[in-house]
Amino acid sequence: MFARKLKALGYPSISNFDHSDQKKIQELVIWLEDQKIRHYKIEDRGALRKTSDISSWQRAFSKYLDDLSCPHSDRTNSPVTTDWLLGLAVRLVYGENPQRYRKCTKQTNSASKGVAPSSNPLDSLDFDDEAMKAGITTLATLLQIPPHHDHKEVLKAICKLVKERLSKEGLELYSADGGDDSKDKLQLESVDMGFHTGDYVTEEAVKILRLLHIQNLRQLQSQINEALVIVQNVTANPKTDQRLGKIGR
């Protein structure tokens, strides 16, 4: 999960890194602060170096995330916070000398096969680039989109939100409601699941899945209606050649 970012940052112990090992996490955090992030002065990094006392180090790590303005509420050394720290480090390294990385071009398959390059600028983007991943994470944070281990899934969520809320149609709908989008907000408490499991988290997840299923059905119904309209336009207004018609036998 972290191998690409660790390799991009030049972390010396990639093969030995184990996120389930508390000591490995502590070593990574100290290395990132010393070599890449450098948010604290050298004399202020002492609390992060006191790794023997786990509870004391955890408090120092939580404060460290606060000082870095980490957008995630989880202040433990979870995979989410670790991935965010690595993304921040990649972004900072890129920002120090962006011209160096802009000169690096990825040889595409089309270029190697002699195919004419596409005029679409999106085709030349490397969605697995670390700077791209960091940008996706930052944009998702601004749009309040929950994190996901697959950055491409996060990008899909960003595209969907932009299409539905920030497109021309979405903005017109927002303006028609007087700038109040509260009408579009549905509280999960008001959704009837139809049964009860006794587990709050499970029931909330089921409600969300049910709403997504209903949305998919509505989209399918809209597509069916559009297809029916197209067919009716063809059958209700047939084009005939009167010259081919006959009167009598």
Image (cartoon, grey):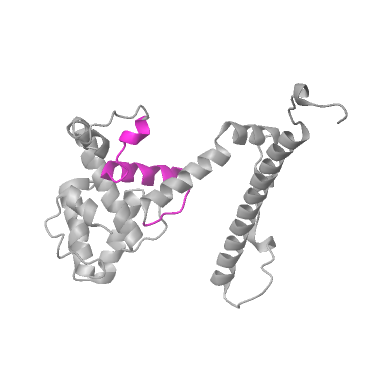
Q: Residue at x 37, y 54 (%)?
A: 150
**Quarter of the view holding residue 226:** top right
The quarter of the picture where the C terminus appears is top right
The quarter of the picture where the N terminus appears is bottom left
Which stretch appears magenta?
121-149
Q: In the image as oriented, which residue stretches furthest toward the bottom?
A: 198
**Quarter of the view holding residue 200:** bottom right
Q: Position of residue 8 (x, y in %)?
A: 19, 48
Left or right of 46: which side holds 188? right
Name the foreground residue: 49 vs 35: 35
Q: Is residue 137 above or below residue 104?
A: below
Name the foreground residue: 22 vs 137: 137
**Can you see residue 38?**
no
Q: Is residue 21 above or below residue 229?
A: below
Q: In the image as oriented, which residue stretches furthest toward the right?
A: 248
User: Is residue 7 shown in magenta?
Assistant: no
Q: Residue at x 78, y 23 (%)?
A: 242
Q: Position of residue 215 (x, y in %)?
A: 62, 53
Name the foreground residue: 187 vs 155: 155
**Can you see residue 102?**
yes
Left or right of 225: which side holds 164? left
Left or right of 128: which side holds 173? right
Q: Position of residue 219 (x, y in %)?
A: 63, 48
User: Is residue 143 shown in magenta?
Assistant: yes
**Quarter of the view holding residue 28:** bottom left
Q: Residue at x 35, y 30 (%)?
A: 121
Q: Position of residue 190 (x, y in %)?
A: 69, 61
Left or right of 230: which side holds 20? left
